[in-house]
Image (cartoon, helix red, strand yellow):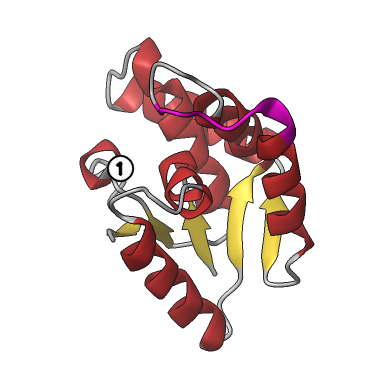
């Protein structure tokens, strides 16, 4: 299994994104080697927010386009959502305190905690520095 963050989903959704081809190549390689692509369901919400933001993309996806893209992506049998659990929430709180993290680190810390408690040890991300503090999580960048 390999985890995906929101930025990776955006790179896949926007064909003109500079990292699109490299990201697609990594994702296809992972799938061809039998790896499931996983991410917490909260990343779906983050994707919808980011991909439709005109301050980030020109043109952004419309909400209908973003919803359609996500629904199609989730139909792939090699894609699976991970749900937050009490254990992942507890791990988030532990890491927030242990590493003295602030409010801007909550979502990435929770993503790492959900992956960690689900036994996922690899994350495809374009922001490896955001996850460097979580030593048991190997980051792969496109």
**Which quadrant of the view contains residue 106?**
top left
Residue 55, above or below 95:
above
Q: Is residue 40 visible?
A: yes
The location of residue 114, given as percent across then percent down, is 57, 44
The residue nearer to you, when weighing 78 against 12, is: 12
Label 1: element kind = helix
Q: Is residue 85 visible?
A: no
Residue 98, above or below 10:
above
Q: Which residues are magenta?
A: 57-64
Rate crowding at label 1 as few (under 14), some (14 to 19) or many (20 or more) other CA atoms within 10 Å. some
**Residue at the extreme bottom of the image, as rendered:** 33
How many callouts does the rendering have? 1
The residue nearer to you, when weighing 128 against 121, is: 128
The location of residue 135, given as percent across then percent down, is 27, 52
Quarter containing the N terminus: bottom right
Would you say 11 lies left or right of 139 here?
right
Q: Residue at x 35, y 51 (%)?
A: 125
- Whether residue 61 is in magenta: the answer is yes
Residue 61, above or below 20:
above
Q: Residue at x 69, y 27 (%)?
A: 63
Quarter containing the C terminus: bottom left
Residue 80, above or below 7:
below
The residue nearer to you, when weighing 106 against 127, is: 127
Would you say 41 lies left or right of 116 here?
right
The location of residue 81, given as percent across then percent down, is 70, 52
The location of residue 85, given as percent across then percent down, is 70, 38
Would you say 64 lies left or right of 57 here?
right
Q: Residue at x 28, y 51 (%)?
A: 18
What residue is disc 1 on? 131
Would you say 62 lies left or right of 23 here?
right
């Amino acid at each position: 299994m390999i985890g995906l963050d929101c930025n990776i989903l955006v790179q896949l959704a926007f064909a003109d994104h500079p990292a699109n081809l490299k990201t697609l190549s990594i994702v296809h390689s992972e799938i061809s080697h039998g790896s499931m692509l996983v991410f917490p369901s909260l990343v779906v919400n983050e994707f919808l927010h980011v991909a439709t933001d005109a301050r980030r993309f020109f043109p952004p996806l419309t909400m209908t386009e973003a919803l359609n893209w996500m629904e199609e992506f989730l139909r792939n049998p090699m894609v699976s959502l991970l749900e937050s659990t009490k254990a992942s929430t507890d791990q988030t709180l532990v890491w927030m305190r242990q590493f003295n993290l602030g409010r801007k680190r909550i979502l990435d810390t929770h993503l790492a905690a959900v992956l960690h408690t689900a036994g996922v040890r690899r994350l495809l991300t374009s922001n490896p520095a955001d996850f460097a503090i979580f030593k048991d999580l190997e980051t792969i960048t496109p």
